[in-house]
Image: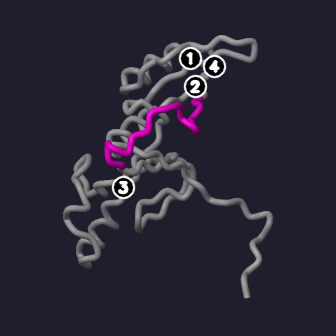
Amino acid sequence: MTATPTPSAPLHWKLVVDAHDPHAQADFWAGALRYEIEDHSALVGRLLGLGAVTAESVVDHHGRRAWRDAAAVRHPDDPFDPDSGTGLGRRLLFNRIPREETEAGKNRLHIDLHGPAGRRDAEAERLCALGARVRRKVVEPAGEWVVMTDPEGNEFCLH
């Protein structure tokens, strides 16, 4: 017998981004969004101690153990699991992919950032200082925004 899902219960989700350097991407997006980098060091240590993962699967990042092939950032006000360090709310997860798996082309999904009113240029400068680049400025009857790229070339918009 299968359980019937509750129709009114919202789904938990996270945005997963393919990355060549997950930790650099997490650093950039944590700074861009003013999010926190998730600290998985307690979970990593436990799994290493049990022999469930190898030393090759972890790295030292910002002075703590982290997964070699994944890093995440979470909203600082959202709950998180203290045992694993995993965010339980708004979060971005960056998974390492091999360089040969890079596909050229337009993003099919992107993030829109909404900075303080009247401060788009200052916010664009702040993001560029973190490693973003301005691709183009868009001025249309529907509005104005800046198309930017993160350090690995993923497009996002600043409104």
Q: Which of marks 3 and 4 is nearer the N terminus?
A: 3
Residue at the right extreme? 7
Neighbours of disc 2 within 10 Å: few (<14), some (14-19), many (20+): some
Per the image, is 136 magenta? Answer: no
Neighbours of disc 1 within 10 Å: few (<14), some (14-19), many (20+): some
Task: Report helix, strand or loop for mark 3.
Answer: loop
For label 2, the residue is 115
- In the visual, does 90 lie left or right of 2? left
Rendering coords of residue 134 (x, y %): 46, 18
Neighbours of disc 4 within 10 Å: few (<14), some (14-19), many (20+): few
Task: Report helix, strand or loop for mark 2.
Answer: loop
Task: Report helix, strand or loop for mark 1.
Answer: helix
Distance of mark 1 from mark 4, alpha carbons?
7 Å
Rendering coords of residue 11 (x, y %): 67, 60
Q: Which mark is residue 39?
A: 3
Q: Magenta residues: mostly which secondary structure?
A: loop
Which callout, 1 or 4, points to the residue nearer the camera? 1
Residue type at mark 4 is: Ala
For label 4, the residue is 117
Question: With respect to residue 2, does 22 lie above or below?
Answer: above
Span colored in magenta? 97-113
Q: Which of marks 3 and 1 is nearer the N terminus?
A: 3
- Residue at x-position 19% and y-position 65%: 55
Residue type at mark 3 is: Asp
Q: Nearer the viewer, residue 129 or 135?
A: 135
For label 1, the residue is 120
The image quadrant where one finds the N terminus is bottom right
Distance of mark 2 from mark 3, alpha carbons?
26 Å
Distance of mark 3 from mark 4, alpha carbons?
32 Å
